[in-house]
Image: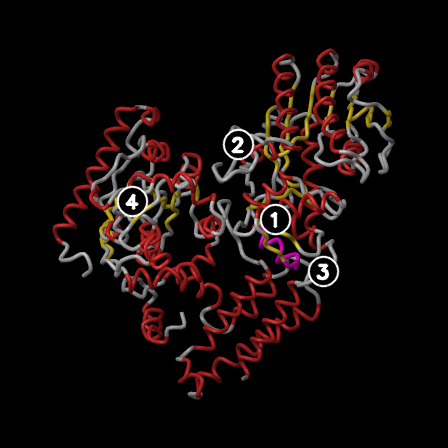
């Protein structure tokens, strides 16, 4: 948000009613900021009211809040009238951004924010976590998103994607793609392997970013609540496959995702990700080390154990994420979710769609890196 | 003929509150409170009978007084005083429940049984679903401590329900009970000046206010209301979720993240000097957290808690002395910074 270059776009869009598209679009974060108090200094006046959880607020604080609100309304026209030095140095509207940042800091410090049952911290994800991954998405992998409008604007949907790349960067990029580019500003709730929730720090961040364990209970609950759920049914078989098998879809588990979608009546959106296969070309797999460390695989890439931590830097490939036509699942009878033949057929249909789209995208691709 | 209610675990503060609460309803003829030691809390007009539920004598008590409702609240994680031992608590939980249920089985007058259990029965493991429902079977069953007791108690209760299908059996799985006077292990934990946390984990916690706990026990021990159904197992928790980091910030207490092995060691050290009961299952809770679904409670039992998780915690935090980093001071500091930025 501190990037001065995006400010004019920002203002244009706000004036035009705030539509998305465009690379720098961070609609959700911006919309929330606007809700908090239209970019002005109002948030500060508002927060003391919200912060009355612990230790009932008493005289001084409310008084302070009231004076804060007062000076805010007085201060805004003043700062827009004259062009002060700070405005030129820090870019226009810096004070509004500082105010927003400080009220964010205030909410974080006092614990006055909300998380859902799964631990999804929408505010932290929008303001911090997404901004951390976004440079990677925009500048490093230069992700091109196609057909994001195939995710319905409301109601539950199950995004099924291929999985690759040794480390699950593709999941994160998929999340940024939906977050930044979907016209209805939807958030993707990814289902992650249990390993994610066993690792310290990783599990904490994953929960706060809205991920949850890949199990039928959690997926059903999320779909019932009308969330967009992202799943990569290949699992470790897909992400940990050798470089020679790139873009060959692995078996889609037992197709549990199909029956979950059927039970919830949520459409399945097939999604093909090209570019993630080449970020860490896995030329070997040390089974002994994997078993020793309790990981499903231990990758050996041209750089990884050789250059130590430097080997964890992915190759800057050019990515394409293509969302396909949604496959409706609401036309089936109640007991269809237990019909194995139907499950296999639907699973195959989804798998074929993703595989064909992958081949199509690969043919169109000019080079791995551009 | 009026109702005769027998309540176990009368020495506990929550039980005493429950006893005082049901007296206000007025549809109870006799209220018999049972515990080993005379209670330290006011019981109102209830009759206290010193009896050990681990002894078969409890059966005579049931028959003598024609008890029709048994509220079993003597299922606890911690000993009552600082001198009580974990072994005797376990014995009361497990053997006591066995004896009590045996006695209930032989007492034809018993029509209703309410058991206070805990969401501890779900355990806490990274492989579990994020939200537990009543029918979830935990991936890793609790291996010891109170959680195992609760699992065993519920097993006996299920057996009893099979053998006496005419008795309405209600099992209430309470989330962590919190409130201004709660004396649960988690409340003790939140009273520490610096909260030791597990590095790299931010568990999701759910609380139920003590007032709500008393209310739901009163609701379950009475005749079910029209359209509601009180037999069965219910998760009892306030709506919403708080992360441990949020709790610490709202309390204004700094956290001290420690690696898991270190915190295990520190836990046993703290326990040895008697500062707080930092049991392995509490460490597990503070590592992986636990959230339960409460739609059964709302729809079947017809109970809506007055306090959400955040409100219950707020009420608890309000009753505590301010911590080292009071949220109000921090908010004030940010506001002053804001002022400085605006004028500078």
- What residue is drawn where x is 72% and y is 28%? B90
Q: Chain of mark 2?
A: B
* C-alpha span from label 2 to label 1: 23 Å
Reading the image, the residue beneath label 4 is: A163
Q: Nearer the viewer, mark 3 or mark 4?
A: 4
Q: Chain of mark 1?
A: B
CB of mark 3 within 8 Å of CB of mark 1?
Answer: no
Are discs 3 and 4 both within one chain?
Answer: no
* C-alpha span from label 3 to label 1: 27 Å
Tag 3 or tag 2, which sits nearer the N-term?
2
Reading the image, the residue beneath label 1 is: B262
Q: Quadrant of the C terminus of chain B?
A: bottom right
Q: Position of residue A134 (x, y in %)?
A: 35, 61
> For the magenta stretch, what is the residue range?
B243-254
Secondary element type, mark 4 = loop
Reading the image, the residue beneath label 2 is: B140
Q: Position of residue B36 (x, y in %)?
A: 83, 27
């Amino acid at each position: 948000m501190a990037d001065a270059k995006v400010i004019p776009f920002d203002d244009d869009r706000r004036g035009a009613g705030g539509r998305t598209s465009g690379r720098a679009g961070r609609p959700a974060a911006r919309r929330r900021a606007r809700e908090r108090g239209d970019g002005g200094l109002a948030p500060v006046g508002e927060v003391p009211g919200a912060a009355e959880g612990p230790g009932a607020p008493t005289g001084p604080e409310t008084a302070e809040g009231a004076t804060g609100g007062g000076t805010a309304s007085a201060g805004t026209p003043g700062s827009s009238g004259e062009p002060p030095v700070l405005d030129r140095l820090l870019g226009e509207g810096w004070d509004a951004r500082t105010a927003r940042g400080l009220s964010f800091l205030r909410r974080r410090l006092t614990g006055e924010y909300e998380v859902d049952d799964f631990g999804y911290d929408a505010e932290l994800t929008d303001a911090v976590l997404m901004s951390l991954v976004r440079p990677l998405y925009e500048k490093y992998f230069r992700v091109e998103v196609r057909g994001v409008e195939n995710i319905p604007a409301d109601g539950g949907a199950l995004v099924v994607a291929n999985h690759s790349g040794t480390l699950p960067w593709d999941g994160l990029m998929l999340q940024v793609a939906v977050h930044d580019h979907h016209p209805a500003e939807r958030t993707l709730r990814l289902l992650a392997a249990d390993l994610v929730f066993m690792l310290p720090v990783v599990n904490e961040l994953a929960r706060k970013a809205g991920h949850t364990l890949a199990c039928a209970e959690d997926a059903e609950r999320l779909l019932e609540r009308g969330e967009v759920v992202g799943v990569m049914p290949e699992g470790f078989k897909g992400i940990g496959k050798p470089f020679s098998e790139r873009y060959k879809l692995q078996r889609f588990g037992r197709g549990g995702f199909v029956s979950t979608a059927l039970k919830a009546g949520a459409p399945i959106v097939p999604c093909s990700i090209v570019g993630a296969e080449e970020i860490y070309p896995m030329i070997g797999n040390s089974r002994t080390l994997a078993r020793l460390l309790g990981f499903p695989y231990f990758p050996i890439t041209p750089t990884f154990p050789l250059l130590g931590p430097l080997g964890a830097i992915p190759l800057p490939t050019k990515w394409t994420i293509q969302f396909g036509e949604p496959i409706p699942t609401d036309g089936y009878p109640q007991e269809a979710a237990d019909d194995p033949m139907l499950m296999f057929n639907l699973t195959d249909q989804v798998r074929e769609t993703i595989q064909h789209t992958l081949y199509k995208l690969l043919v169109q691709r000019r080079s791995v890196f551009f | 003929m009026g109702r005769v209610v027998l309540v176990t675990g009368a020495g506990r503060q929550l039980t005493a509150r429950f006893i005082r609460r049901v007296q206000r309803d007025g549809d109870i003829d006799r209220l018999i409170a049972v515990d080993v030691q005379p209670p330290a809390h006011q019981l109102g007009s209830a009759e206290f009978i010193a009896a050990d539920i681990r002894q078969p004598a409890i059966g005579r008590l049931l028959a003598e007084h024609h008890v029709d409702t048994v509220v079993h609240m003597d299922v606890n994680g911690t000993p009552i005083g600082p001198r009580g031992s974990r072994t005797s608590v376990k014995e009361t939980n497990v053997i006591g429940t066995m004896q009590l249920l045996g006695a209930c089985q032989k007492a034809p007058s018993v029509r209703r049984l309410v058991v206070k259990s805990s969401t501890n029965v779900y355990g806490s493991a990274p492989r579990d679903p994020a939200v537990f429902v009543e029918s979830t079977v935990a991936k890793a069953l609790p291996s010891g401590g109170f959680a195992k007791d609760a699992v065993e108690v519920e097993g006996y209760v299920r057996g009893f329900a099979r053998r006496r299908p005419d008795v309405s059996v209600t099992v209430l799985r309470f989330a962590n009970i919190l409130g201004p006077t709660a004396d649960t292990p988690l409340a003790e934990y939140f009273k520490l000046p610096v909260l030791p946390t597990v590095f790299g984990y931010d568990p999701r916690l759910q609380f139920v206010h003590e007032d709500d706990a008393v209310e739901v026990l009163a609701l379950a021990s009475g005749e079910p209301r029209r359209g509601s159904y009180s037999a069965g197992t219910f998760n009892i928790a306030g709506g919403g979720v708080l992360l441990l980091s949020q709790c610490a910030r709202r309390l204004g207490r700094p956290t001290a993240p420690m690696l898991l092995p270190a915190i295990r060691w520190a836990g046993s050290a703290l326990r040895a000097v008697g500062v707080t009961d930092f049991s392995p299952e509490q460490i597990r809770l503070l590592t992986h957290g636990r959230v339960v679904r409460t739609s059964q409670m709302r729809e079947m039992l017809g109970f809506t808690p007055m306090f959400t998780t955040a409100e219950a915690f707020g009420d608890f935090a309000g009753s505590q002395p301010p911590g080292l980093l009071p949220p109000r001071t921090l908010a004030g500091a940010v506001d002053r910074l804001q002022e400085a930025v605006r004028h500078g």
